[in-house]
Image: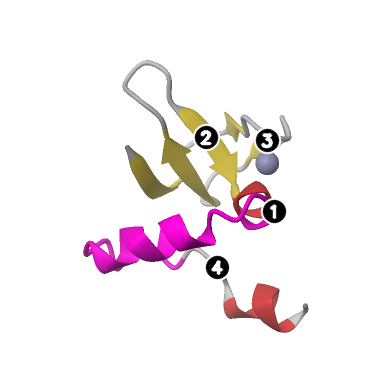
Amino acid sequence: MRRGLTATGQLRCHACKRNIEHGERYLLQGEDGKEQRWCLDCCLKKGEAADVADIKEKGERHITFFPSSKFEDK
Ligand SMILES: [Zn+2]
């Protein structure tokens, strides 16, 4: 399971251990009971962008996982 979600309350990124603040986007992946939450930065670093695009194609269009400004900075 992979889903792009918006944090409600404060979560912790599985990869970098930083807090994902309320309202921030993150990626939920893994099986039930063993989910991992990844922050935006870690998704970009680990090349999860393709998965996020996949999520969007499946219809969860309210998710804009990568703000355009993030891309333009690179
Ligand atoms: Zn992270």
**Do the residues bearing badges 1 and 4 touch, measured as CB atoms within 8 Å?**
no
Earlier sequence position, callout 2 versus callout 1: 2
- Pointer 1 residue: 45
- Pointer 2 residue: 37
Mark 4: which amino acid?
Phe
Distance, label 3 to label 2, CA atoms, is 10 Å
The location of residue 14, given as percent across then percent down, is 62, 29
Label 2's element? strand
* Residue placed furthest toward the left: 59
Q: How busy is the neighbourhood of tag 4: few (under 14 within 10 Å), some, or many (20 plus)?
A: some
Q: Which label was assigned to residue 19?
A: 3
**Do the residues bearing badges 3 and 2 touch, measured as CB atoms within 8 Å?**
no
Mark 4 vs mark 3: in front: 4
Earlier sequence position, callout 4 versus callout 3: 3
Q: How busy is the neighbourhood of tag 1: few (under 14 within 10 Å), some, or many (20 plus)?
A: few
Mark 2: which amino acid?
Arg
Q: Which residue is at a point 63% across and 34% down the rendered structure image?
A: 13
- Pointer 4 residue: 66
